[in-house]
Amino acid sequence: MGASLPPKEANLFKLIVKSYETKQYKKGLKAADAILKKFPDHGETLSMKGLTLNCMDRKSEAYELVRLGLKNDLKSHVCWHVYGLLYRSDREYREAIKCYRNALKIDPDNIEILRDLSLLQAQMRDLTGFVETRQQLLTLKPNHRMNWIGFTVAHHLNSNASKAVEILEAYEGTLEDDYPPDNERCEHGEMLLYKISLLEECGSLERALEELHKKGSKIVDKLAYKEQEVSLLVKLGRLEEAAELYRVLLAMNPDNYRYYEGLQKCVGLYSENGRYSADEIDKLDGLYKSLGQQYTWSSAVKRIPLDFLQGDKFYEAADNYIRPLLTKGVPSLFSDLSPLYDHAGKLHFAVMIQADILEKLILELEHSIRLTGRYPRRTDKEPPSTLMWTLFFLAQHYDRRRQYEIALTKIDEAIEHTPTVIDLYSVKSRILKHAGDLAAASALADEARCMDLADRYINSECVKRMLQADQVVLAEKTALLFTKDGDQHNNLHDMQCMWYELASGESYFRQGDLGRALKKFLAVEKHYADITEDQFDFHSYCLRKMTLRAYVAMLKFQDRLHSNAYFHKAAAGAIRCYIKLHDSPSKLATEEDDEMSKLLPSQKKKKRQKLKRAEARAKREAEVKNEESSASGVSKSGKRHVKPADPDPNGEKLLQVEDPLLEATKYLKLLQKNSSDSLETHLLSFEVNMRKQKILLALQAVKQLLRLDAENPDSHRCLIRFFHKVGSMTAPVMDTEKLIWRVLEAERPSISELHEKSLIEANKFFLEKHKDSLMHRAAVAEMQYVLEPNKKSDAIKLIEDSANNLVPVNGALGPVKGWKLKDCIAVHKLLETALTDHDAASRWKVRCVDYFPYSTYFEGKCSSAMPNSVYNQIGKNHENGSASLPGGGKIADSVASNGKLEAFKELTI
């Protein structure tokens, strides 16, 4: 570096490099300017000055200088390396790799460039190149431990675990017998555990176990040692030894559910689906009773038997488990037991019986405490709070069973008993949300929040309720109470608060504000891009610190990152926004299209070019402005000022897309790749491709829907709609059309739902199979109207003849209806929009009022939508973010902040 410079300037060049490495950028710039005064065309100095400016957020200048430096000295590996670093800082990894490869053509043995290249190859999962680069690094510097480990991991990631083991053994051969020293024992132990996991992955189980026992004294993490050993013993079929080891692990941590599951497998009493014979249940009961005597303080050993016991034994075990927790006042008790209400492995009747037994048990406890102040068959008096926690449990129980009136009665009684317990108000808020009164739920959540202003969880729950009630402004101001001072709106984004952005996006979507909704959904998508980027620093850190098992697990997690539920929701939300935008384009876009349609083709081309130039100029000006503000925006303390204001806070620019369906397809491909087993993915695929007239892709979506759940109402809708659309198409003319037609003719017979049936017959057959289900009847009615528009009255009658049958329960206090609120709302919207019969929609609304008296959507008699309700004014002023409380004041007036009242002053304006 700087070899072509005189000694004085060469020393200055070294100072530039050192200043860059130590982040003394002004000092580096000064040295660069001193060299450039004498040698203005020195390429390496120009490149280093550009790299320094890049670190000072002056990107446009940085790129100009680096490109000029490269132009002046194309044969310099420094210039190419710097150009690669510049691209890397902007996440242009493929371009950076090209630059590094060009640098290596000039200096093929440069370790620094090779190391940077290997990091990018790991990031981009160029595993073949990663192996080659790591091998070259090891060849150049074989006495460096990190090069051995990097070469090992490269082969492992490239699906060659056996080669990775060989490399590790070769590395161990270079070590002395007394290795490691005390300060490296942890790192060496991690390497040994990694090697054993590689042997396990190769299938060399005996060798792995032998190696584990041989090197056990050098492994510091004894818990990981035992867990690895028991895993190998189970895979080798040595179950008795494994069972003994699981008991040792349970002695160390008797609340670890995985250890109990492993012990059950070892004694042959484990079932994947949770179903057991009577004999197996007796054996399991005996096992857990013996374990319970050993670990009397363990919660898990008492809770796990509730998953398999039935009848009287379940009653006894549940009684023993619940009583002390009610006495102690554990708010999470119902959450702990809630899996018993929908245990996937049990038969439906068994689940109902378990829920009924729980109800019977808690009612008996409540009755005994009311009358005597003590539990049944007990002499000790219970504290007064036990009754309150029993009512608290019952309220959640009835809420789960959709018996909202009983649930509200119980929770109101609990609040009257002890009005200072915050959890009571939170649960009442949840019950009202399930009952359909979102405004009242929001008010109660806010009341709970005001009782403890320092609790972030309660604040977050309150924000969630406000967003569900579409009180977005108020929700945002409430969420900001727990952000740092300064640029608070950016703080929520910087904290990657995805649940908030998703809930906010859904609220904006419901209100028809597609710009803001898209902005929130795409913000979540950006978080996932940032999470992917965040792995970059770990490629070198984990190899240096030898956290190899965690590193490989992290890389595997990153590879399936986009299958996460939050990303799925964000991508699906964005696709729905683009579909809606395509169906109902914004007014501005429509006006622009009308204006363009009046122009000649040559004028259209000129106008488009003019618009592109204007956009590019505006972008450059914004970049320069940002750079200037970044350069000047440094306080005396050295901290930067807040980020520049968002140029598009309402997402208006996001709506100005030429082809919304093209944008939707980008996110749809990600869902198809990462969430292929989700019904929603293929429903969205069907909607997008039908609008794009991509018939074969729409057929593919239909087939995937039928594969996942052929009995789902939405799958049936898509099937009928697709073949109805195909049936109405004109005869094929072009060769491509004829080919598509032949594919459709070949595929239709393979669809069992349409086998030797017309669409009308298939629709009737589907009705016969699901005549007791409201949503299935609604789907059939909608498709009947599509197929036979003249029989609209029959389709409406099909819906109106649906019966809200009682769900059979034993001993419940009130009837449990089969219909769900969200389904009834969906049917009402169907009657209003798809079937366009407002009279039928009104009749349906009147009918649903009796079933859902608390629903504001149906204006139920007990909801806040009615004048006689104490919450009747809540939610009527969403636009300015205010809502009324029972006392007549505004929520904004009652909101107390944790030292940040100024954030709420504008709420009362």
Image: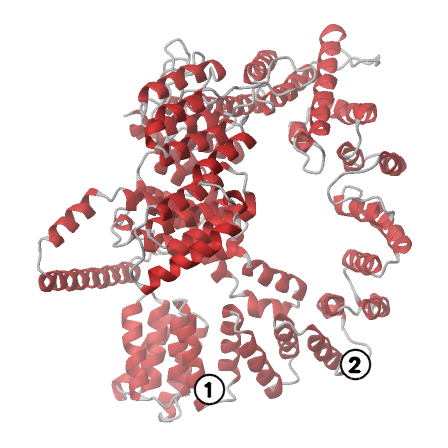
Q: x%, y% of residue 615?
A: 20, 60
The color scheme shown is secondary structure
Where is 244 relative to 765, above or below?
A: below
Could one spot residue 890 in this view of the protein?
Answer: no
Could one spot residue 55 in this view of the protein?
Answer: yes
Extreme residue in the top direction: 371
Where is 103 relative to 487, above or below?
A: below
Depth order, front residue of 39/319: 319
* Residue plotted at (77% across, 82% down): 173
Quadrant where the image shows the N terminus: bottom left
Q: Amino acid at mark 2?
A: Glu
- Secondary element type, mark 1: helix
- Spatial CA distance of label 1 from label 2 is 35 Å
**Circle on res. 465:** none
Q: Quadrant of residue 417?
A: top right
Where is 29 relative to 528, above or below?
A: below
Q: Amino acid at mark 1?
A: Leu
Depth order, front residue of 571/867: 571
Q: x%, y% of residue 263?
A: 83, 47
**What residue is shown with label 1?**
104
* Mark 1 surroundings: few (<14), some (14-19) or many (≥20) residues within 10 A: some
Extreme residue in the front direction: 756
* Residue plotted at (77% across, 68% down): 203
Q: Are marks 1 and 2 in contact (CB under 8 Å)?
A: no
Q: x%, y% of residue 290?
A: 90, 37
**What residue is shown with label 2?**
176
- Secondary element type, mark 2: loop
Q: x%, y% of residue 169?
A: 75, 78
Quadrant where the image shows the C terminus: top left
Left or right: 635 with respect to 288? left
* Residue plotted at (45% across, 58% down): 529
